[in-house]
Image (cartoon, rainbow, N blue to C red):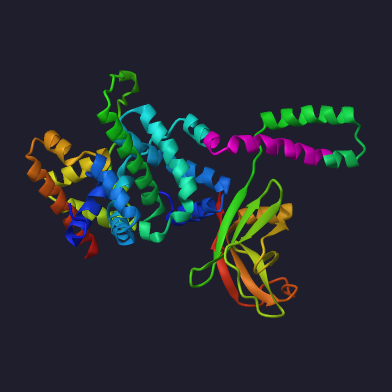
């Protein structure tokens, strides 16, 4: 079969997305797509057009074992059990500072493990991807109420004018913006967030970044232009 | 349907290896995608395997998603559907022993009123313009992965008729959506 005919390429791409193309024909079409960017674009267009048909099925919740299997295959399980212990040792360091003996510490370990096994830990986490007015991404901000931190990942380095700083703000509904700290234009950063600020975060729908004098806004409110914004999503 | 922007942000966070975002994405979308897998495969264990494989792919390929591939939901559904088609073919090639317990009694239902987002509404409108037989054949292949030959058998029509129905209805839907 000749695959250089536009009509044929279009028809096969449509049938690939629809599902009538099967078996060897499907495999052959997939191998052609790998080396043919324009064919992939035709498939993408069909996908855009008829893909939403899959939304017309009534949802069926899968059994929990499916997610357990995914976690296991991606190695998520192993790490989460480590993090419980890590959390304990972090707490232990604190207790040591208070002069606890080893025996008391081991009692504390049992108590702690009992506590975490009976009470689910409520963790509020949010993510926001900051974009400028041209929809170019700059930073990704994730917040975690457990360690009271906001982790800022630089997705694309930004140009920062001399004697200026980027300041991150949360925008609580019906209130003035609250500063979360300064961002680096090119390096990842972790900001500590107080319990009070974390509470305000649950009342915020978005974050913003403004351009301020170096050292940050002198007034406690944004003074320069807001250059980046991102909606907060609960995760 | 889920908020498209929310899914985009979550998928973006997944491409930066954010596990919490992936968990949330799974919680928001797995029931829709499981319905897609069940409808094609009609067997519980096969559908579960396909769903699992699909989410592993989604995690691994999150950075490959672009707007040119349609919505996040449509992109994720395509990963499930294509994987399910592969499994379906392999099943049909091998001798399948009867496994009544594994058969699903109630398949997820088709409810066109669920197509309520802006792009989906336009699609619903365009699908409704096809004649009943054409629409039926298009849907059977989309939701159940039937080939031309299988459609001919199911609808008791000559193969040539089915091929031209599919060809014409695809073009008609596309033309309608581009207007």
Question: Where residue A224 appears, x then y in whole percent?
Answer: 64, 78
Side (left or right) of A158 relative to B61: right
Residue A180 appears at what percent x and percent y? 69, 62
- Does residue B7 lie above or below B84 as drawn? below
Q: Main secondary structure of the magenta part?
A: helix
Q: Is residue A77 magenta?
A: yes
- Total numbered labels: 0
Q: Is any part of residue B92 visible from this angle?
A: yes
Residue depicted at x 69% and y 80%: A162
In the rendered image, residue B35, in percent from the top left (x then y), is placed at 35, 37
Q: Residue A22: in sight, yes or no?
A: no
Provide residue A158's location: percent of width, then percent of height: 60, 71
- Left/right of residue A62 with respect to residue A111 in the rendered view: left
Taking depth in this image into account, of A182 and A30 the one nearest to the observer is A30
Q: Compare residues B126 and B160 and report the one nearer the observer.
A: B160
Q: Residue furthest bottom?
A: A162
Relative to residue A234, is residue A108 drawn left or right?
right
Quadrant of residue A190 within the rendered picture: bottom right
Magenta stretch containing residue B103, yes or no? Answer: no
Of residues A161 and A108, the one drawn nearer to the viewer in this rendering: A161
Residue pictured at 38% horizontal, 27% vertical: B45
Residue at the image point whose x is 35% and y is 47% from the top: B78
- State which quadrant residue A166 falls in: bottom right
Magenta stretch, residue numbers:
A71-92
Camera-nearest residue between A233 and B11? B11
């Amino acid at each position: 079969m000749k695959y250089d005919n536009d009509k044929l390429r279009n028809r096969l791409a449509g049938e690939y997305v629809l599902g009538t193309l099967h078996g060897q024909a499907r495999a052959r079409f997939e191998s052609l797509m790998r080396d043919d960017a324009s064919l992939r674009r035709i498939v993408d267009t069909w996908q855009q057009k008829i893909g939403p048909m899959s939304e017309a099925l009534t949802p069926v919740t899968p059994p929990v074992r499916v997610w357990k299997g995914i976690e296991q295959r991606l190695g998520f399980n192993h790490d989460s059990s480590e993090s419980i212990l890590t959390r304990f040792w972090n707490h232990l360091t604190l207790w040591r500072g208070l002069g606890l003996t080893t025996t008391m510490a081991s009692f504390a370990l049992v108590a702690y493990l009992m506590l975490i096994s009976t009470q689910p830990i409520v963790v509020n986490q949010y993510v926001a991807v900051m974009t400028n007015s041209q929809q170019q991404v700059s930073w990704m901000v994730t917040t975690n109420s457990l360690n009271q931190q906001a982790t800022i990942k630089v997705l694309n380095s930004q140009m920062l004018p001399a004697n200026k700083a980027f300041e991150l703000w949360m925008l609580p509904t019906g209130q003035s913006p609250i500063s979360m700290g300064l961002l680096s234009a090119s390096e990842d950063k972790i900001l500590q967030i107080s319990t009070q600020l974390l509470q305000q975060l649950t009342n915020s729908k978005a974050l913003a970044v403004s351009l301020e004098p170096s050292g940050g806004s002198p007034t406690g409110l944004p003074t320069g232009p807001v250059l980046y914004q991102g909606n907060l999503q609960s995760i | 349907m889920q908020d498209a922007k929310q899914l985009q942000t979550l998928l973006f966070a997944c491409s930066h290896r954010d596990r919490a975002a992936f968990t949330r994405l799974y919680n928001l979308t797995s029931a829709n995608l499981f319905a897609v897998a069940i409808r094609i495969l009609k067997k519980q264990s096969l559908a579960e395997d396909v769903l699992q494989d699909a989410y592993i792919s989604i995690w691994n390929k999150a950075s490959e998603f672009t707007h040119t591939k349609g919505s996040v939901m449509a992109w994720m559904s395509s990963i499930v559907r294509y994987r399910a088609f592969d499994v379906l073919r392999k099943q049909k090639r091998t001798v399948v022993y009867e496994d009544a317990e594994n058969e699903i009694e109630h398949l997820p239902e088709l409810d066109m009123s669920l197509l309520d987002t802006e792009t989906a509404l336009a699609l619903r409108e365009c699908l409704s313009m096809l004649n009943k037989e054409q629409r039926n054949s298009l849907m059977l292949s989309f939701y159940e992965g039937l080939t031309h030959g299988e459609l001919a058998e199911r609808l008791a029509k000559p193969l040539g008729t089915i091929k031209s129905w599919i060809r014409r209805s695809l073009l008609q839907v596309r033309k309608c959506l581009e207007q």
